[in-house]
Amino acid sequence: MKHINILMVDDHPIIIEGYQNVLMATKRDDQTLLIDTANNCDMAEIMINRASKETPYDVCFFDISLPASEDGRYTSGEDLALLAKRVLPNAKIVILTMFNESFRIHNIIKEINPDGFLIKSDLTSMELADAFQQIVKSPPYYSSTVNNYVKKTFSSEIYVDDINRKILHLLSQGIKTKSLNEYIDLSLSALEKRKKQLKLLFSVTDGKDETLLKEAREKGYL
């Protein structure tokens, strides 16, 4: 009999209940699932640290949007995932989120490189069950939105670093070029230069920001 210790972190009790029900109903006969739950960063931090000293978790599910810890050290599921990676090196890390913007997907893959990455709007109970078994046996498992993003980005030859991604993201949010340096620690002339480079990279001939954003979107950078 295989015991699988699981931590589920989400601030909506009904969602956690749904995940638990799906996993319990679809587990294999030789699996026993022991599921702990937390609905904020403080609770999750205590459970992760306790597990590191006692019985480590095999799989940790993290929602991204969570109430921050009292001391402000942990503000999201991303922070908790990084803590879990550090103190529970053998745990499989699964991110479940509503966020489906390319910018967020890119950052999560880059920072956390999770064993499972599921966008909630992609999920059916059957897919969650399949994802869980695959993550336990041979990760990673990405849901369709993440998969499409990865395929588009990695098949594209364009290399866009994190600052350029942030520029694209801010422009897509309607931030004007002259205000970019309020969000990015670079001079306005350095930001202008990067914007010109992006337009060259994406073969923007009319010089318009709208065209740059359209091209970036089509290639999966936004």
Image: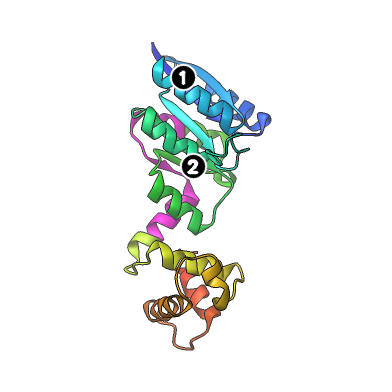
The picture places residue 184, in percent across and down from the top left corner, at: 49, 66
Vertical position of residue 173 compared to residue 104: above or below: below
Q: What's the magenta bit mostly, secondary-structure-wise?
A: helix
Q: Which mark is residue 155?
A: none
Q: Nearer the viewer, mark 2 or mark 1?
A: 1
The picture places residue 119, in percent across and down from the top left corner, at: 53, 45
The residue under label 1 is which amino acid type? Arg
Q: Residue at x 37, y 33 (%)?
A: 86
User: Which quarter of the picture shows residue 196?
Assistant: bottom left
Query: Is 73 included in the stretch rendered in magenta?
Result: no
- Magenta span: 131-152
Could one spot residue 120 in this view of the protein?
A: yes
User: Which quarter of the picture shows residue 70?
Assistant: top right
Q: Residue at x 47, y 45 (%)?
A: 143
The residue under label 2 is which amino acid type? Glu
The picture places residue 172, in percent across and down from the top left corner, at: 57, 69
The picture places residue 180, in percent across and down from the top left corner, at: 53, 71
Query: Is 141 included in the stretch rendered in magenta?
Result: yes
Q: Give whichever of discs 2 and 1 has the lower sequence position.
A: 1
In this view of the protein, which residue sits in the foreground, 181 or 202?
A: 181
Q: Residue at x 53, y 80 (%)?
A: 209
Is label 2 in contact with label 1 (beta carbons under 8 Å)? no
Vertical position of residue 138 compared to residue 183: above or below: above
At mark 2, the secondary structure is helix
Q: Which mark is residue 50?
A: 1
Q: Which mark is residue 78?
A: 2
Classed neighbour count for the residue bearing mark 1: other residues with Cα under 10 Å, few (<14), some (14–19), many (≥20): few
Q: CA distance from mark 2 to mark 1?
A: 19 Å
Classed neighbour count for the residue bearing mark 2: other residues with Cα under 10 Å, few (<14), some (14–19), many (≥20): many
